[in-house]
Amino acid sequence: MRNDFIDNLSHSLNKMQREGLYKKERQISSPQAARVEIGHQNGVLNLCANNYLGLADHHRLVNAAKNALDTYGFGMASVRFICGTHDKHKELEEELATFLDKDDAILFAACFDANGGLFEALLGPQDAVVSDSLNHASIIDGIRLSKAQRYRYLNNDPVDLEIKLKQARAAGAQNIIIATDGVFSMDGSYANLPEISRLAKFYGASVMVDDCHATGFVGNKGKGTPEHFGVNVDILTGTLGKALGGAIGGYVAGPQPVIDMLRQRARPYLFSNSLPPTAIAAGLEALKIISESDDLRKKLNENSKYWRAGLKALGFDLIDGEHPIVPVMLGDALLSQKMAERLFDLGVYVAGFFFPVVPKGQARIRTQMNAAFTTEDLDQALHAFEKAGQDLGIIT
Ligand SMILES: *Cc1c(COP(=O)(O)O)cnc(C)c1O
């Protein structure tokens, strides 16, 4: 590479570092769990994993993956349509579809790929996507890759959504898809699916919901935000990388022709390797666990309530809600980083989020609850928040 190319990269990286925007990665030496080992610290409480149901190191998932490894080997060495489709892929797709009350489902290497391939495969230049402004990066990229007309509405704002739907109709759009996250991951807030569904019906649009931060634990049976609101949506996308074991894999669930078309046309499906048997077997086991009992969901909800109430009582400024994502609002980017550092010294692992991930002046610590935490764990974490908050003058 030419020197000026390399120099420019170095300058940009240095600038990120000076501005405090450079992301560093802490290394975990234990399994992902309620408590993890990081560096010389053992038993660090992990409040920033998407491990909502505590399944990431669950013995049943580990055993299912081990058995699959012994029975089916390690890799498939093919994309799905050449020779990479195993009985187990079909089994998981069927189980996901049944669980989500959809005709069928299709697996991708990740939900990033599911969202990345969805829009291009289904929509042409005569169609339109109307997308929430806070949607996940993979939805934004997926929409960019499609030839459909694009409209963006203000986060969770039905009034603006209706304006954009009118515009799309006036522009002559044939098929319209409204695309939204089921839960907005920086705020822990729910998309207003009842209003979205009502508007979709009125304007003849379809609804696509990315339920990555909901499937498995939101709704009475863990079927996600549609179950939570008692509404039906057309297309659901989701991940095996969060509540359902936390490893790898994504999917789209929906009407049969949608899934069939994705198998023919979705580029990340056609041109990327099929999921390994270990991930599939563990995914099936995760679905079994969440279907056979409400215990983990109950524990997660109890923990979320306890955690929110505890932080509130200490005087922290939260975004109200009921989701296990509990953002502690700090405002200042540097303060959020200092708070995360101080908490880490006190044995609590959290991440500070600031611009451009969240709007300027709305920096925060995003905490996430988990069914694997005990009350003692949470009391210890609350104590650390109290101490760090006082040290930094956030609370008195
Ligand atoms: C995590 C996440 C994704 C990406 O899922 P992966 O399976 O990790 O690629 C997509 N959408 C949303 C809303 C997410 O939170």
Image (cartoon, rainbow, N blue to C red):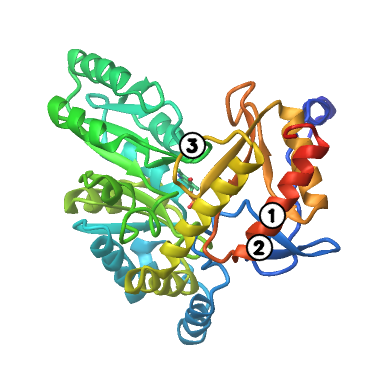
Total numbered labels placed on residues in the image: 3
* Residue 86 shows up from this direction: no
In the displayed structure image, the side of residue 266 where residue 49 appears, left or right: right
The CA distance from mark 3 to mark 1 is: 19 Å
Residue 82 percent across, percent down from the top left: 36, 64
Is label 1 in a helix, a strand or a loop? helix
Q: Amino acid at mark 2?
A: Asp
- First of labels 3, 2 by sequence position: 3
Residue at screen point 15% across, 25% down: 203
Proximity of marks 2 and 1: CB atoms separated by less than 8 Å: yes
Q: Residue at x 51, y 68 (%)?
A: 55
Measured as percent of width and height from the top left, residue 309 is found at 55, 47
Task: Give the spatial CA distance, label 3 vs label 2.
Answer: 22 Å
| Crowding near the residue tagged with mark 2, few <14, some 14–19, many ≥20 C-alpha atoms within 10 Å | some
The residue wearing badge 1 is: 381
Q: Amino acid at mark 3?
A: Asp
Circle 2 — which element? Answer: helix
Tell me the residue at 27%/15% (across/down): 163
Q: Secondary structure at mark 3?
A: loop
Residue 34 in the image: state x and y as whole percent. Answer: 63, 64
Q: In the figure, 46 relative to 119: above or below?
A: below
Q: Position of residue 338 (x, y in %)?
A: 79, 37
Please rate how many residues cluster around mark 3, counting C-alpha atoms within 10 Å: few if below 14, some from 14 to 19, many from 20: some
